[in-house]
Amino acid sequence: MTALFRRIQPPKTFRLTVALVAKYLKIPESLILRFEYWQNVLFVHRTDRGGQFVSYRQLRLWWDAIALLFQTCHTPTALQQLGFQIKEDSQKFSDYYKEMMEYLRQLWVKRRDYLGSLPGKESAA
């Protein structure tokens, strides 16, 4: 489990619905019997093919959680550390795709620029 995964804690923080899971899987809601939050993955019970594992990192909620983490970084140092955690996570897991990384990079740069424009930026905690 990576530092980023421990910070986000998907099984505790993600509030998924059958509709959201079905939309992600691009299937009708009627094909989903239920889903279970497992420690490292979401397990979806389907009527058409049994079970299916889904990485939390593939869900839009993962992106949103990282975006929220950016907003909670009040110093450039904290933001830099979060950037390293994202880089480590993306190198360890293949669930990150090009569009996601570009989106996260843009958010990171925007937050970095904002923090850099604040007076006494490193003194804020």
Image: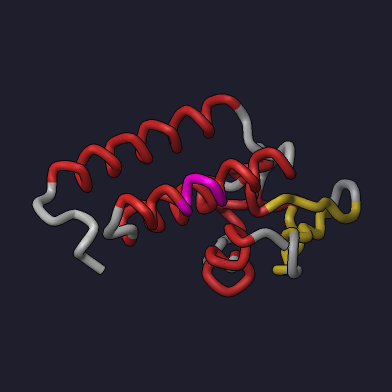
Residue 82: in magenta span = yes
Residue 9 seen in the figure: yes
Is 111 in front, or is 14? 111
96, above or below 62, in the image: above
The percent coordinates of residue 102 (x first, y second) are: 47, 28
| Residue under the image location 59 percent in, 43 percent down | 23
- The magenta span reads 81-85
- Determine the image quadrant of residue 95: top right
Residue 34 seen in the figure: no
Q: The N terminus lies in which quarter of the figure?
A: bottom right
| Residue under the image location 73 percent in, 43 percent down | 93
Residue at the far bottom in the pictured view: 12
26, above or below 71, in the image: above
The percent coordinates of residue 64 (x first, y second) are: 44, 51
Is 11 in front, or is 16? 11
| Residue under the image location 78 percent in, 60 percent down | 43
